Structures are given as C-alpha cells and as structure tokens.
Image: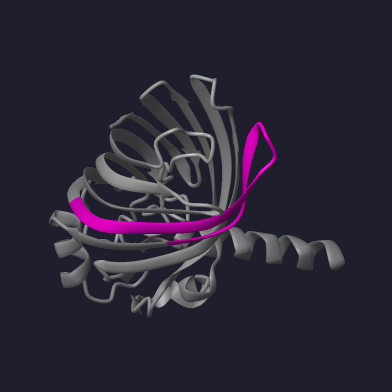
C-alpha cells in the first residue's frame, strides 16, 4: 500500500512538472553581468570599458532555450577603499520554444531585443597582491522589446501555459569578489559571486501556475570569472547558462 501511494505521488509530481510551461521575460535572471573596475594597484583609477558578448541559457524552468548577443559600455572608478561602476547595454536574441503542448499557441522561435543600465558599488581591502571586494551592491534595469514581448502581452489564459508579461525589470543583489594582481603585473584575475533577486509583481497568467514558484521571492546566483591582460579583458559567467564576453579598456 505504501509503495503504491509513493508511486502515485511520484507520477503525479512528474506529470505536473511536465505540464509546467511559463513564458518568462527574456532577461529574467539574465540581466546581471560583471562590471570591470580599476584595481587599487592600477596606476589609472578611472577607466572606460567596451565589450561584446554571447550568451546561451534556459528559462528558470529549464523548458526552453535562449541565445543572445550583447554590447556593453561602462565606466569604472577606484577610490581609497571603494569601487564604483555604471554603464549601459543593448542585446538582441532568440527565444526557442522547445517544450510545446498541444493546446498552446505554437511557435518555434521569436526574436527579442533589449537595453538597460547597470550600476555597482563595493568596499575593498588590499592585502598586497589582491583586492578583496568583500561586500558590494549591484542594480540593473532592463527593458525588453520584440516579437517575444508582443507574444506574451497578447497571450491570454490557456489550459496549461503561464505567462509573465513584464517587459521592464529591476534586479538588485549583493556581491563578493577577489581580484588578484600587482602594479607590476600585466595580467589580473578575478572571481565574483552575485546573489540577488528581480523585484516587482510577476503578473502570472495561466492555470498551470499553481505549481509555479513565486518569482518575486526567488533568489538566484551568478558566478563570474574576470581576466585582464594589458588593456584587453574577458569574462566567463555561469547562471542558468553561460555568458562569454571580450572587451577593451581605454
């Protein structure tokens, strides 16, 4: 009897999970990106950074696949014991609907674009060959446009599908980072962790959202690796997917 009950519960859980399909904003949990800043051991304490990047990731339910290309322009400062950075970004990509149900409005892929702004601040302590950026705050605003955004806004209740129709997102979180290097070095390496959330009302529509976690209470993390050699830099970031960037400091 116990085995039968356990089997029924497992099968029910798998059925519910397989039915869950929520179309989220394209930049939900994916608007965060590492912002370079000068180190305390750099001779120049204010620098500009420009980069291009490529990202592959899934939505938070791991149902569908997204790809995008991104352009970033930012400015960073190093003060006595703090860093500050701010900048803008633009992106264009494709949302690939890989989990389709028979009663959905079917599509294979839709394009999306977006733009926004980022700002980050942190305290640091130097120990000779590294800056320990022990506590930081990062904020991001993003606006989405394109076919995928139009689809979500015009998509009314279906039997299975849920929709989050937001196109404007605000994300904030805490960071901790260590940046290795010295004044004589031409190469720097940094590792950063971000933990934060996207704020606002999710406006979920759809009858399957009874088993969908409340987006507004969901924390997420991002790991970033940063490397700079002379004036060139790159980043590798992991969250729901991977994000690669190459850039130049001037």
Image quadrant for the N terminus?
A: bottom right
**Residue 108 visible in the snapshot:** no
Image quadrant for the C terminus?
A: top left
Residue 88, image x and y in percent?
Answer: 25, 52
Total labels drawn: 0
Residue 30, image x and y in percent?
Answer: 39, 52
Indicate whether residue 191 is drawn in magenta. Answer: no
Q: Main secondary structure of the magenta part?
A: strand
Q: Which residues are magenta?
A: 113-138
Seen at 28% across and 52% down, the residue is 87
Q: Seen in the image, is 120 located left or right of residue 131? A: left
Depth check, front residue: 7 or 185: 185
Q: Seen in the image, is 39 located left or right of residue 243? A: right
Depth check, front residue: 119 or 149: 119
Seen at 49% across and 77% down, the residue is 210
Q: Seen in the image, is 8 located left or right of residue 12? A: right
**Residue 120 visible in the snapshot:** yes
Seen at 41% across and 53% down, the residue is 32
Q: Seen in the image, is 176 located left or right of residue 142? A: right
Seen at 23% across and 43% down, the residue is 93
Depth check, front residue: 86 or 151: 86
Residue 151, image x and y in percent?
Answer: 17, 62
Depth check, front residue: 218 or 164: 218
Indicate whether residue 137 is drawn in magenta. Answer: yes
Where 139 falls versus 81 (above or below)? below
Which residue ends up furthest to the right in the rendered image?
2
Q: How did the renderer colour the structure? A: one colour
Residue 220, image x and y in percent?
Answer: 54, 59
């Amino acid at each position: 009897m116990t085995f039968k009950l356990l089997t029924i519960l497992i099968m029910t859980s798998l059925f519910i999970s397989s039915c869950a399909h929520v179309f989220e904003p394209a930049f939900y949990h994916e608007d965060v990106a590492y912002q370079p800043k000068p180190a305390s051991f750099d001779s120049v304490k204010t620098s500009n950074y420009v980069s291009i990047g490529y990202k592959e990731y899934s939505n938070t339910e791991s149902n569908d696949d997204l790809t995008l290309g991104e352009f970033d322009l930012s400015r960073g400062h190093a003060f006595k014991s703090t860093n500050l950075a701010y900048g803008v970004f633009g992106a264009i990509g494709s949302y690939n609907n890989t989990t389709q149900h028979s009663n959905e409005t079917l599509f294979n892929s839709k394009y999306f674009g977006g733009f926004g702004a980022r700002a980050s601040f942190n305290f640091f302590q130097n120990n000779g060959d590294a800056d320990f950026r022990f506590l930081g705050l990062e904020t991001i605003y993003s606006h989405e446009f394109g076919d995928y955004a139009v689809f979500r806004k015009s998509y009314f209740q279906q039997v299975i599908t849920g929709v989050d129709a937001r196109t404007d997102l605000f994300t904030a979180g805490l960071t901790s980072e260590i940046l290795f290097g010295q004044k004589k070095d031409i190469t720097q390496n940094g590792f950063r962790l971000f933990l934060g959330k996207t704020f606002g009302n999710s406006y979920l529509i759809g009858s399957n959202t009874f088993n969908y976690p409340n987006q507004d209470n969901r924390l997420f993390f991002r790991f970033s690796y940063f490397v700079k050699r002379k004036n060139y830099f790159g980043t590798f970031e992991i969250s729901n997917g991977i994000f690669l960037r190459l850039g130049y400091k001037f």
